[in-house]
Image: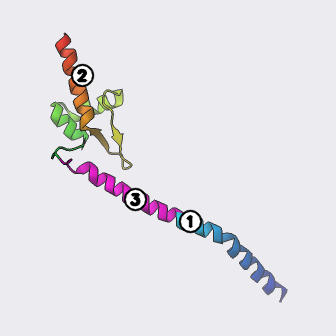
Amino acid sequence: MLDSVLTQLVAAAVSEAQRPLVAELAAARAELGEARRELGELRRALEQPASGGELVYLTVAQVAERLGVCQKTVKRWLEDGRLAHVRLPGGGIRVAVAELERVLRENARKEAAE
């Protein structure tokens, strides 16, 4: 009889102690779901052309193609800090078209000065 009462008391105490944690977990799951939806929207936006038909962000391959260099060269420039870039959560890299244009203008000025 005493064991049964103690078991019930312990179960009730554990259940009561878990309630705030369960509520926190539910809130965290909802927040994670919202963050995943936003991330999906951002990924889709990165892949969509801007209103003028021009891509806003480029992949490493696209940057290499536009510059006429290999992808290794672009990656080296990213590592050296010559090109500002964005890292995606999945490990992908994107370069803003505006950043690429800035670097091209800067290089053109340097070449003109030589």
Rendered view: 81 above or below 57: above
Residue interval drawn in magenta: 28-51
Q: Mark 1 points at which residue?
A: 25
Picture quarter containing residue 99? top left
Please tell me which of labels 2 and 3 falls first in the chain: 3
Provide residue 7's location: percent of width, then percent of height: 76, 81
Which residue position is annotated with label 3? 36
Q: Main secondary structure of the magenta part?
A: helix
Question: Foreground: 96 or 59?
Answer: 96
Question: Could you tell which of marks 1 and 2 lies nearer the N-terminus?
Answer: 1
Q: Quadrant of the C terminus?
A: top left
- As drawn, the residue found furthest toward the bottom would be 1
Residue 106 is labelled as 2
Which kind of residue does numbered mark 3 sit on? Arg
Q: Distance between the residues labelled 2 and 3?
A: 37 Å
Which residue is at a point 24% across and 50% down the rendered structure image? Answer: 47
For the N terminus, which image quadrant? bottom right
Element carrying mark 2: helix
Disc 1 residue type?
Leu
Q: Residues within 10 Å of mark 3 (few under 14, many from 20)?
A: few
